[in-house]
Amino acid sequence: MQKKLSTLLNRPDIWQGSTSSTPEPGLATGYAALDKALHRHGWPTHAIVELLCDHTGIGELQILLPALAKYTQQQRQLVFISPPHQPYAPALHGAGVLTSQTVVIQAASTDERLWAADQLLRTHITSGVVIWLTSPVKHQQLRKLQLAAQANKGLTVLLRPRFAARETSPAALRIDLSATTQTCVLHILKQRGGLAGQIIKLKRPETLITPYMPVPDLPVHAPARDAQTKNLARPTLLPADRSTDTDNVLH
Amino acid sequence: MLWLCLRFPLLPLEVFQLHPLESEDGTEPVIVADRQRVLLCNAPARSKGVKPGVSLATARALSPKSRCFERDLQLEKQALESLAYSCYHLTPAVALCTADSQPEKSEKKTPLLATDSLRLEISGCLRLFKGLSGLLNTLKQTLVDHGYSYRTSLAPTPGTAFLLNYSNTDTIPLFDKISGKLNHSQDFARLLAALPLSALPYNRQLQKKFKATGFCCLGDLLRLPHAAIGKRYGKDFLTHLQQLSGKTPDPQSAITLPPRFDQSLSFDNTITAADMLVFPMQRLLRALCGYLHGRRLHCSRINWHLSLLDGGTESIVLQLSQPQNQFAHFLALSRLQLEGQKLKSPVASLRLHVNHLYPAAEQSSDLFNHHSGGREEDMAAVLDKLRARLGPEAVYRLAPMDNHIPEQAWRKADVDVSNSDSTGSHEHQPPRPLWLLQPPPPLRIVNHMPYWHGELEILNGPERIESCWWQQAICRDYFVARHRDGSNTLCWIYRDRLTNGWFLHGTFA
């Protein structure tokens, strides 16, 4: 009986609440408040991390960047599968991500995105794989991705719209993302082996929210509009035309 | 000297096989004819009563549904060549003997012996394969992949090895498993003497003469004095017999591999679906891999050309991230590409040619560091696969560029090229968005505010970027803006000073 019980308990798909006291440490997120809320003190590896957000531009990639930057600095590959817009190399570089280790894969359909992720994860190359899915996914497809992610010693991140929060997911960590004027709000919906329900507020970078430069009275270049009359299109200095739009908006 | 002779008795038939032998389609009767006589037929045809030697008309009457082919010597030669390439990694002395490779003294004279075979001198390579049995095992693995049926024979001279290939007794047990030395030379001589002359591929005139004189096995000829044989059967035959016993040297010309690989297969109009091309592709890729192994080369690009029956052509180019020589990888990529192909008309021929060849880079793996072992190749392989399915444009790396204009401050880099990151620090630069919108969508102005799915409130700026006055002048003021609609998205917007228009250029993800 004892033997039977122990073989049953040794199955990898049976989770025991008592073993969660000594979890394998995760990857440091780079944010102390977030590390504290995660029971593995960082992003879980060998599993899917699911981030749910509806808008691009609320800092959804920013919270991943410290961990991903560390990856590329260890000469490991970082793969973006179907990002919603073009990842901008100078900004990534500024955040410490080595762009020479960054691969972008554009796949149109959900099936192709999942296939690409599956191919990458099954090679056992420790890497950061970030996948964007916009349309609804079947649970079996996510389950397959989760099985593939178990082979990945690195970070597997899935970004989905917020309506997916209503569906079940095999992800080890699910975080709902929103933003206030100053902060990015992380609401932990699910954490395998740990507590859920915490709300963490991470401040957006200071350089974005606080003015770093006063509005100066800058001159402006304008090329000669009428190139027909002048042989050479010579740039001329015009005084800055301070239009009403800017004046209103910038106090 | 130890010669291994490989003969492929069913080759004329098997070159026309387009499916693996075990597939169900392989069960239709197939007949190969040479000058209106059946040369070979497969088992289903034989069960209908078709036999080698009967006329083609009779065979057609017996088995009307059978597919008939005229013997294609060119195709057979190509198959033998690809087999020779594959055997090249066993020994450098691989001789390819076909009817046209025999040195002929006069054009009219038919050769004494039909000699289609591969002859390998293996005495120098036994130690590498840890003895004769090791070498034969490696040979077996190589040949099984090709799928042709074959016979092997061993002998101290190439001529004897070839003739013994027709013997019913296996010659391999006569030799020591490790050293490759002959165990009992008497047995060997007896075996050679017992060969029936009628079974050996001597030409028709010789066979007639043998019959007339009443000789039935090779031993009868070997016993005769040389002068008598020379007088009766000609000088060439005497030389041939002396070469058998090793008294006269029997030079074999070893193959040299051509500088480029180019092979093709042609079909009758049976190939209508892309997946039917997989088996012929396997054949060509095997030949390619044998060739690459033999020359110690890797290739970075594979070109497939399909000629269609309606006269059109289609080509499939496989670009590899890293030069390599792996059969399985080539095949997987070719299959992926084929999946996307729709054939407008049946395929008449398939050609594989490879120009981009590089010396194989020997990679030594690290003894202690487990991080780097094989990882780069794995990544390259998976990227190849992704590119083959999603298209070459869909997979790329990023590279920053030194340019003030935001949209030109980066470029798409090839995944193959491992570009090093520029060391320039970007830490103290003004904020840059993680997502760039290309082309930047224009913004409306509502209530004196830029509007993009909601009102945008400007937080920060401007940062003026002004450049390229010598061509398309650029003069922009960039601002960080926030959506007021509750989503609080941070955007990077600019006002074009020249047109006074507002544009959204990125978001701070």
Image: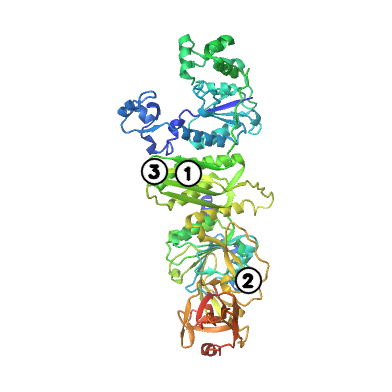
Colour scheme shown? rainbow
Q: Is residue A63 left or right of residue B264?
A: right
Quarter occupied by residue B17:
top left
Question: Is A70 in front, or is B166?
Answer: B166
Near mark 3 (Cα within 10 A), the count class, few <14, some 14-19 or many ≥20, is some
Among the 4 quarters of the image, the one containing residue B421: bottom right
Position of residue A251 measured from the top left corner of the image (x, y, whole percent): 56, 90
Q: Is residue B98 visible?
A: no
Q: Nearer the viewer, residue B280 or B112?
A: B112
Res A59 label: none
Pointer 1: residues within 10 angstroms few (<14), some, or many (20+)?
Answer: some
Q: Is residue B239 above or below residue B297?
A: above
Q: Considering the image in quadrants, where does the C terminus of chain B appear?
A: bottom right
Query: Label 2: which residue?
Result: A94
Query: Of helix, strand and loop, which one carries label 3?
Result: loop
Which marked residue is nearer to the observer: mark 2 or mark 1?
A: 1
On the image, numbered disc 1 is attached to which residue? B351
Tell me the quadrant of the picture where the N terminus of chain B can be found. Answer: top right
Where B183 sits versus B60, above or below?
above
- What amino acid is found at the position of numbered circle 2 in the picture? Gly
Q: In terms of secondary structure, where does tag 2 sit?
A: helix
Q: Which residue is mark 3?
A: B271
Q: Give me the C-alpha separation between circle 2 and circle 3.
A: 55 Å
**Closer to the camera: disc 1 or disc 3?**
1
Left or right relative to B313: residue B195: right
